[in-house]
Image (cartoon, helix red, strand yellow):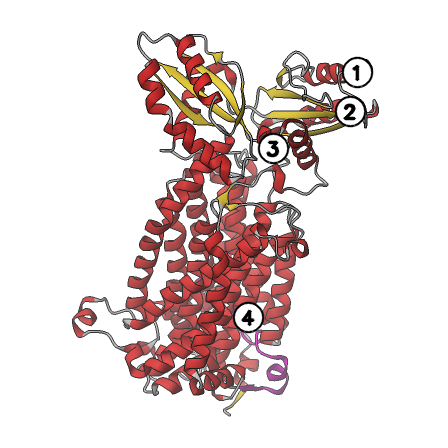
Amino acid sequence: MATFLYQVGRLAFRRRWYVALVWAAVLAAVGLGALKASGASDEEFSMPGIESQKAFDLMEQRFPGASADGATARVVFVAPGGEKVTATENRQAVEKAVADLADGTQVASAVDPFRAKAVSKDGTTAYATVTYKVAANDLTDAGKNQLERAIHTAQDSGLTVEAGGSAMDDGGGPGGAAEVIGVAIAAVVLLVTFGSLAAAGLPLLTAVIGVGVSMATILTLSEALGLSTTTGTLAMMLGLAVGIDYALFVVSRYREERARGRAPQEAAGLAVGTAGSAVVFAGLTVVIALAGLAVVGIPMLTKMGLAAAGAVVVGVLVALTLVPAFLGFWPNAVLRRRARRSGRIEEEGTRDNGGSRWARFVLRRPLPVLLLGVVGLGALAVPMTDLQLGMPGDEAKSTSTTERRAYDALAEGFGPGFNGPLTVVVDAKGDTDPKGAADTVAKEIGGTEGVVSVSPARFNEAGDTAVFQVVPATAPTDERTKDLVTTIRGERPGVESETGATFEVTGTTALNIDVSDKVQAALIPYLVVVVGLAIVLLLVVFRSLFVPLKAALGFLLSVLASLGVVVLVFQQGHGAELLGVEQTGPIMSLMPIFLVGIIFGLAMDYEVFLVSRMREAYVHGERPGQAITSGFRHSARVVVAAALIMIAVFAGFVGESDSMVKMIGFGLASAVLFDAFVVRMAIVPAVLALLGDRAWWLPKWLDRLLPKVDVEGEALGRRPESGPESGPEPDPEPAGTTGLEVART
């Protein structure tokens, strides 16, 4: 591995123009494809195998003209203080607004609240449901403007008018500010780490190129593969983070090799052969974790994972080829300014620095450091025992949004359960009387404790399927609503035996409950698959039994701790105001899967980068304690910089208004913080110090079975020392190269 990548690095350095032109051609090709593509789709969320999804599919089949995926808007009218919406003037204003709403070219229907009996018991609140012929993503600006004009006209009459529903969705997701903030902080971190504008700018430049290729490819394939806008968000987030990190490690190793007296082309080859090997295996762990999302069984999540994995692969390829090519254009520019001016490169690898001093501190006190780290993360993980999964809706949005105000108005006028009605689909089979069966099911469900009301049944044209709404007494995210759904489904066997018809419960509330249950059930198999494959991979990399096990256990600690702080803030509300979280509630159902999938890969990045240098020192004859110190001396500063960059990229998303994006950004930033600074920088060296030589032990029978992969560059170390570069194409800047002296300290 190391020898092959060494040749790749030298070739990319020597043929830098060809490499740069190839990447430029790839970027241009996919960019042109992205411009011609119709854009990302607004993919309908689906999860095969759950009851609510089966019921939804049945509705689409039996009610083909209902446009089940069409956009909807629920416009809420609230009378001024002391008045009622049924008063003559207020009623006229509502009816005019409904007529205006129905006048849109994309509108299928707008239901008058007075005819539909959609008025609260106290008469202060009414709502009109607007159904569109097209999905939310296909609504034109004219259609949205027509909705807004009707709302403003009603507001001018003195009514309070708010609107919610899918038609109000503006697309969500990051708007670009998060990425800008992340890149800006990353630039500062790189500048402080390297002390050179070129060295700081090169990882940023190559990462942006890699993200450009990835995003353009996703846009090009979005229509053919049904990729949603969320898919691109995750790919961009991860592509930017790992792209910077991988380039950072190669550039750092290049500077180290230059400090050892290597000529630029040789240094580039050695950097790709050693740090590049770690990049390959670190990237492979991320790809395994992301591709493993397919285990969960959610098509949208599988596509997101595979697209993000593709972005990581592009980041690895950029680090192995484009980074050494750019080093070929400017071999001395990435060095410190003092080195460029004085002609002397100081070899930092043998000097004491913060990393080596911290390592010696841990070596002197391994047990207290280990206990403090484990107990600290364990304490942060305790709130996770109270974890409640769900899909936050409009209730989690800011009160400055009309969707949140509409939600609150409906909850106040009609009860908290009105915002999350259950949809019951009754399927009459054979000679069963459909109307009698629907009436029996409705009566049975209506008498269930926790049900406020049941709407009249609506039949399809064939008359064999009925649909009606059930309004719970509790809010959609309330645990009692989940218990109610379980109770209603538990009544099914008795009803079926009595009527000969079957029924299923669906709707947004039921779908969210089913998704949460399925995700929880899939979490353990997903962990087993991903962690198992990664342990095997790390066994091959480090040829040690304890290092992979320690890496996996440390990862579990950091993930549990990050889930704990997410629950602490977003569910229990501690410090929520500091992050702009106005409403606490259940944690997004997919959050644990996101954390496990993404953070596992990134955690293994730090493990590979840090421990591979320890392994390298150990293989070359250093004692276990010395190897730990050497590993920290060479890699600690770069790992810290990489972690800070990751935290900056993820934390930038905390500033977004979307509560789910905010939650994901906070959770990922917390997990990186815990894993990099507590697990990898404290617990890992403490465990290795306590194990000593045993840390690198591997049973002989297992050693014979595992393939030999040279990640530490041991084969490169046996090569004869190379002098100044020679060959058909000389290095650029020959005067600057030959004039540099090496000061070994």
Check disc 1: other Cα within 10 Å, few if <14, some if 14-19, many if 20+: few
In space, the residues marked 1 and 3 are separated at their CA atoms by 25 Å
Q: Nearer the viewer, mark 2 or mark 4?
A: 2
Q: Are marks 2 and 1 in contact (CB under 8 Å)?
A: yes
- Mark 2, residues whose alpha carbon is within 10 Å: few (<14), some, or many (≥20)? many
Marks 3 and 4: in contact by CB < 8 Å?
no
Q: Residues within 10 Å of mark 4 (few under 14, many from 20)?
A: many
Closer to us: 717 or 192: 192
Q: CA distance from mark 4 to mark 3?
A: 48 Å
Magenta segment range?
321-346
Q: Is residue 596 left or right of residue 159?
A: left
Report the amino acid beneath label 2. Ala
Image disc number at residue 87? 1
Amino acid type indicated by mark 1: Ala
Q: List x then y, in percent, for residue 41.
A: 52, 34
> Which residue is the site of mark 4?
641
Name the image quarter holding residue 82: top right
Q: Secondary structure at mark 1?
A: loop
- Residue shown at 28% from the left, 69% from the top: 709
Which numbered disc flags the more N-terminal residue, 3 or 2? Answer: 2
- Out of 470 and 11, give the one closest to the viewer: 470
Residue 372 visible in the snapshot: yes
Q: Nearer the viewer, mark 4 or mark 1?
A: 1
Estimate the x, y position of residue 380 in percent, counting from the top left.
Answer: 51, 63
Q: Tell me what residue is drawn at x 55 percent, y 60 percent.
A: 669
Q: CA distance from mark 4 to mark 1?
A: 65 Å
Q: Position of residue 63 (x, y in %)?
A: 46, 15
Which mark is drawn over residue 416? 3
The answer to which quarter of the image holds residue 471 is: top right
